[in-house]
Image (cartoon, rainbow, N blue to C red):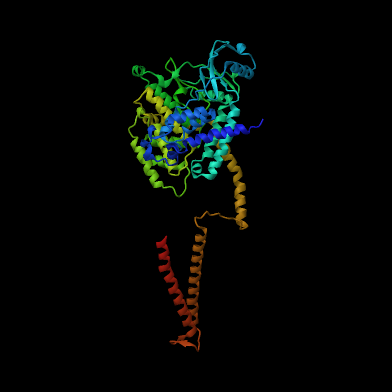
Amino acid sequence: MSVLPDNLDRYRKFISFMLKYWQSDLVRNTTSNAMEDEEKNKEEDFKQTPKELVEDLKNMGPTYIKMGQLLSTRPDLLPEPYLKELATLQDDVAPIPYEEVRKIVEEEIGTRISKAFDTFDEEPLASASIGQVHYATLRSRQPVAVKIQRPGIKKQFLEDLDTLRELADLAVRHTATARKYSFDHVLEELSRIVLYELNYQREAQNLKTLGRNLSEFRDLIVPQPIDDYCTGKVLTMEYIQGKKITSLSPLKQLEVDYSPLVDQLVEAYLQQIINDGFVHADPHPGNIQFTPDAKIALIDLGMVAKFTPQMQENILQLLIAISNTDGAETAKVLLEMSEYNEETDLRAFRKAINDIIMESEHSTAKDMQTGRLVIQLNRLSAESGIHIPVELNILGKILLNMDQIVAVLDPDFDLKKAIQKHVSTIMQSKFYEELKPENFFTMLLQSKKLAENAPARLNKISENLANNNFKIKIEAIDEKRVTDGFQKVANRITLGLIIAAMIIGAAMLMQVPSEFMILGYPGLAMLFFLLAALGGIYLSYIIIFKDENLNNKD
């Protein structure tokens, strides 16, 4: 059977979507998104509202739902009203029939459900675009949550991604907007995230890693996988009874002081970002559960972020600068970790960054400013032609979700002060981490390697020097100009030597008798003196007047 009709349907679906929104304020604000217009971009200003966009993405299928979730982390691409609505985008889809669930589970774990589990609820706890979750109990009566991947979902994702990749490549080749915002790179990131989430064994490993990293936080829970019942398409983990953290009643918030719990949660995420480099990258309220015993559970680790040691240091410097309300240092850190060209107006960028930082000086959790602030920094960087690392987009999304959660538990919590308080502890822990024996031995091995290679390298350098093969490569701004400058210097030195030689020669000729006399002196000597004088006057004129004019032009 030909796949052409399916391809045509996918093209039709995407092109219809683009035609609907092409003339909307969404695209116009995306392609010319100015910071001063943020307050004007209210939902009523759009012909197609942010909520309508979310519904359209849901109707287009799981690939587009994931794309919407990814775009919610890209403030450089979308106006703020759309970012807010996309941040709430949940893959709320029809459940898989129980018969299909049973078939998938039994094929994956290699035994009947009735043998593996004591009970297995037919009705799902939740149903998402990639899979759905069922409550069950093991033979040991331990309650578990079983996540099952939707049948055929991988094939659907790959086909949709191929279509989007073709259209993105076409757009990048033919439109300046697509090139400016790197649509092809956005799609690559989407592909990486989706393919990662499709492997439940990786998510099981993520649960183990995060649980190990946060083991010291007594009020934070990470459900652990049940290895015997985990495969690429089935993930069985400890069941956490809880509810969305944002569903707490206002009365409950007044009765209980949640500030110690909030402080612990913030410290845990700072540790993930700065110390571990392994972060729960999707901490929206649905993935942060509040348990009956007043603890916080971090669930759904399909999406994680990994930061390199260098990026961890950069983010640490950025968070310190923001918490100290230091606009100049914030701009400096952003520029050091980003890419930009000579046409970038760095002075205007630094001023805009300083203004944003100063405005946020006295904000608290209820203002939800910290995450929004990082998103504003990301957006301003993109508008200024500065390409920031994608990790900062992820950081902005994480902090935005954290602001929302913290604002529910403790509206007056000062996230900036919390960062300042925990930074010293985190830096100390990071320092001790670097002093571990294995790191020390790595440094020794590198030093040993350097010492072993030093004699051979020194020998090679001395041999090249002896054979006149030693070369120095200079990266000059304007090689021709530098070469011309050296040539002028050489010419003037040569002319000076010739003048000096003529003067010396003329002085020596003064002692030689000659019939040719000028003013009573040997004529040949006088001619040499005259030529030397003219040469000296000419050289002085060039040095005094010509060089001064060139310096004024520069």
Residue 537 visible here: yes
Image side of residue 249 versus residue 457, left or right: left
Q: Which residue: 58% across, 23% down?
A: 150
* In the foreground, 319 or 351: 351
Labels in figure, total: 0
Indicate the position of residue 519 as horizontal and vertical percent values. 43, 87
Image side of residue 522 versus residue 255, left or right: right
Residue at the left extreme? 362
Residue 228 visible here: no
Image quarter where the N terminus lies is top right
Instruction: Name the image quarter holding residue 200.
Output: top right
Indicate the position of residue 251 as horizontal and vertical percent values. 34, 17
- Position of residue 371 relative to residue 134, above or below, is below
- Position of residue 42 relative to residue 123, above or below, is below
* In the foreground, 220 or 104: 104
Image quarter where the C terminus lies is bottom left
